[in-house]
Amino acid sequence: MAKILNVRNLEKSYSSGSKKLKVLQDINFEVEEQKTFAIVGPSGSGKTTLLGLCAGLDRPDSGSINLCGSELSTLGEDKRALLRNKHIGFVFQDFQLLPTLTALENVAVPLELQGNKDASKIGKELLTKVGLGDRIHHYPSQLSGGEQQRVALARAFSTRPSVLFADEPTGNLDTETGEKVEQLLFDLNKEAGTTLIIVTHDLELAEKTQHILRLKGGRIVENQVKHV
C-alpha cells in the first residue's frame, strides 16, 4: 500500500517571551493510503500542532512532510492552498460552519470553489446520507451540535478528499451523539476510500483506528500499527 503521508525528523518550536518552547521533536511516522490513523496524547503534547503541520497549515522548523506525493517544504502558500483544496478535507471540534449559510450551502461551498456544477445535488445527497435530508435549508443556529457536526462531515467528504484530517471531531458532543458521529465518520470514510487522520484524547475512538501514534511532551512514545 502506498504511503500518503510521510513525516521525517520533524521539529517545531514557538517563542514564549524570551524563551523558545519546543512543541515537537524528532517526529517520524508514515500513513498508508485508505487507512484510519489516530494521534493521541494529553493536552499540550503537540497533537494539534502536528495535525496543522501535516495538513500544510503551518511550517516546521526542520524536517520533511510529504503529503499526497508533494514535499510541503518546497511549496509556496498558493500551491499549498491548491493542494489542500484538491486533496484535503477537515473536520474540527467546533464545526466551523458559516453561520449565514444554510446546511446545504455550507456543504456546497467547497464544491462550488472547485467549479463543480453539481454542487447542490451532491450536497443534498450527502446531507440525506448523514440523516439531515429534511434540514438542508436550516442555518447552523437552528441545528444541534450533533447536527452541525454531521453537516461538517458532509462538507468534508463533498470533494472526495484523499485525506481527511479530523481534530477532536467528537470533543464538543455528548457521548451518545459522539458515537453516532464517529460511526458516520468511519462509514463515510470507508465508502469514499479516504485516508482518515484523527487527533483525539478519546482513547476509545483511537482504538477503532488501524494505527495509533501516541505523543507525550512533543515526542512519540508509541507507534502502534494494528493488523486490521
Image (cartoon, helix red, strand yellow):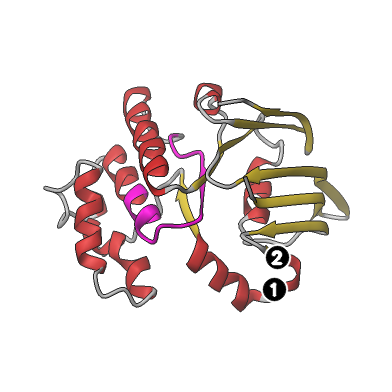
Q: 15 or 8: nearer the eye?
A: 8
Identify the image quadrant of residue 223.
top right
The residue that appears at 24% across and 59% down in the rendered structure is 123
Image mark count: 2
* Bounds of the magenta segment: 153-170
The residue that appears at 78% across and 34% down in the rendered structure is 220
At which x and y percent is residue 219?
80, 36
Position of 163 relative to 116 (above/below): above
Label 2: which residue? 72
At which x and y percent is residue 189?
42, 43
**Badge 1 local density, few (<14 within 10 Å), some, or many (20+)?**
few
Left or right placement of residue 23 versus residue 127 in this view: right
Residue 75 shows which numbered tag?
Answer: 1
Position of 20 relative to 201 (above/below): below
Q: Are marks 1 and 2 in contact (CB under 8 Å)?
A: yes
Q: Is residue 15 magenta?
A: no
Q: Secondary structure at mark 1?
A: loop
**Residue 102 seen in this snapshot:** no
The residue that appears at 15% across and 49% down in the rendered structure is 135
**Badge 2 local density, few (<14 within 10 Å), some, or many (20+)?**
many
Q: Tell me the amino acid under the disc marked 1.
A: Leu
Left or right placement of residue 128 versus residue 177 in this view: left
Identify the image quadrant of residue 31.
top right
Q: Tell me the amino acid under the disc marked 2.
A: Leu
